[in-house]
Image: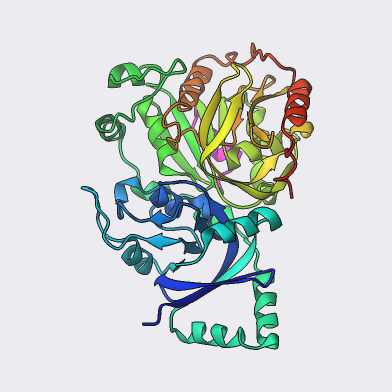
Amino acid sequence: MSTKACLVLANGLVFNGKSFGASGCITGEAVFTTGMNGYLETLTDPSYYGQIVTQTFPLIGNYGVIPDDFESAKIHVRGYIVRSWCEAPSNFRNGGTLDSWLKSQNIIGLYDIDTRALTKVLREAGVMNGMIIAGDSEEAKKAFAALETESGKAALLETIKAYKIEQAVETVSCNATKIEKDANTVFAESAAYRAVPVRADGTKENDQQAAMKNGLGKKVVLWDFGAKANIRRELLKRGLTVVTMPCTATAAQILAENPDGIMLSNGPGDPSDNVTIIAEIKKLLEKDIPIFGICLGHQLLALAKGAKTSKLKYGHRGANQPVKHLTTGRVYISSQNHGYAVENDTLPKGAVLSFVNTNDGTCEGVTYTDTPSFSVQFHPEAASGPLDTSFLFDEFVNLINNHSYFKEFKTPYQRVDAIAYFASTIKDSKKNRA
């Protein structure tokens, strides 16, 4: 089979390389992620639905394919781009090569291109649509031929520009439920790798009974907009009973479960597209039930409360995003994957900015003082610190056990003062805005 392959961006730039994985053509939104590892989690994260993902780290696939590390039951990216992939992975849990896994899931890959140059384009021009053409399938042959003529390339670019991510949340909801495990198994597996709950003071809770005691007897609905499996695991480690419900669930159906708390999960796409879900969240906010939102869930909760979201120029994707906790002044290294952000200056009364991104000053967390709810833009379950922000799941348990927990919220900065502080100290605070 031919290994000829290329990426064609919507601005007309062409990056020539070689093919791995499946053969054919695929169009998607071209983005980059800066994680040095975690490629298995990236590929199976439903939040990447509709996107062609570029890894900035030059070597990918060195520890192979490990199903236990998947965040959902299948790959969700549209296409995958790396500088080089490892043909001979080494890990005691390895179950195969990246190439064979991509082939099995019909995912087209591109390698042997200058991923640094591509990343610079996406940083300067912003994320844009692109098409990977790979291999010797009839579809690929026609696309390669089209690139040889002006009219053919123009037609190809029109197709690329027309692509839009649609029905994203509906498409990926409840994929992670296929790999769910019971609480005892989850804790035992986590303890084997020292991935046990970490408290706010940084201490680990290795004893299962102690870690679970505050959550036992409490039920949480995990409202799945494309949930990563580790969100559920973190809830189970704290003794909570978790009921996963699809994105199509209504407030009435959720309330019929008589939950003690509601988790709004991560997910893909433009948060403002989810009009029906936002309307249902508004109904839940009237019931005084503790709510914790992560990533897309954070954005949807903010929209339900009256804030606005906007698209970032190139987003935050990777395991090395610094966020500052305004209550303590501490900076955490977080894992993130999002292309939209809540606009700081649109937060309504009763919404307190709790975390900010120290690179560009964007909103990374909100605590609501008029309802028992809070949210973060980053992923506390994703082990980037590696475990230092997982205490937020304990905060959720505390909120479930005491609804007034956050009503006494205090911060060293007023909301407006915090925005002004970061605007004055970070010169490029607007660079990542669309």
Q: Residue drawn 48% across and 62% down?
A: 81
Q: Quadrant of the image for the N terminus?
A: bottom left
The colouring scheme, among rainbow, by chain, secondary structure or one colour, is rainbow
Q: Is residue 414 left or right of residue 295?
A: right
Q: Residue drawn 68% across and 37% down?
A: 360
Q: Position of residue 356 (x, y in %)?
A: 65, 30
Q: Position of residue 159 (x, y in %)?
A: 66, 76
Q: Quadrant of residue 199?
A: top left
Q: Is residue 160 above or below residue 423?
A: below
Magenta span covers which residues?
248-259
Q: Is residue 29 left or right of residue 414?
A: left
Q: Position of residue 167 (x, y in %)?
A: 60, 58
Which residue is more in the foreground, 34 or 277? 34
Q: Is residue 131 above or below residue 429?
A: below
Q: Position of residue 75 (x, y in %)?
A: 42, 58
Which residue appears farthest toward the left when viewing the image?
92
Using the rendered image of the protein, determine whether residue 25 is visible from the camera's viewpoint.
no
Which residue is more in the foreground, 170 or 152? 152
